[in-house]
Image (spheres, helix red, strand yellow):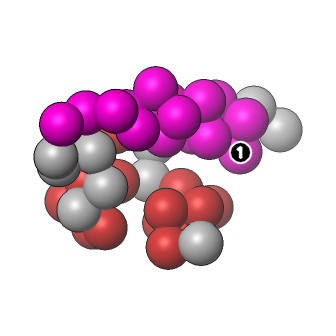
Amino acid sequence: MDVINTIANGATTVEEVRNLTFATGGNGCCTRQVERLIECIHSK
């Protein structure tokens, strides 16, 4: 939920999401998922 809320509140890049939530900071397995969430949430 933290990642979704961060994107909904204006984060538009994986780097912004990483800086605010620490998601995608490990082995990178969720980077593509975060990219898809950004696309979906900001495509309105």
The residue at which mark 1 appears reads as 41
Q: Quadrant of the N terminus?
A: bottom right
Crowdedness of circle 1 by 10 Å Cα count: few (<14), some, many (20+)? some
Q: Position of residue 19 (x, y in %)?
A: 19, 59
Q: Position of residue 43 (x, y in %)?
A: 75, 32
Q: Would you say residue 34 sits in the magenta stretch? A: yes
Q: For residue 39, say whether it is visible.
A: yes
Residue drawn at (62%, 40%), measured in percent from left and top? 37
- Is residue 43 depicted above or below 10 in this figure? above
Residue drawn at (27%, 45%), measured in percent from left and top? 24
The answer to whether 21 appears left or right of 44 in the picture is left
Furthest residue in direction right, as rendered: 44
Occupied quadrant, residue 5? bottom right
Residue drawn at (46%, 26%), measured in percent from left and top? 32
Helix, strand or loop for disc 1: helix
Q: Nearer the viewer, residue 38 or 27?
A: 27
Q: Please identify the dominant SS of the magenta region.
A: helix
Residue drawn at (18%, 36%), measured in percent from left and top? 27
Q: For residue 15, say whether it is visible.
A: no
- Is residue 20 depicted above or below 41 in this figure? below
Q: Which residues are magenta?
A: 27-42
Q: Would you say residue 8 sits in the magenta stretch? A: no
The answer to whether 9 appears left or right of 32 in the picture is right
Q: Quadrant of the C terminus?
A: top right
Q: In the image, what residue type sits under mark 1?
A: Ile
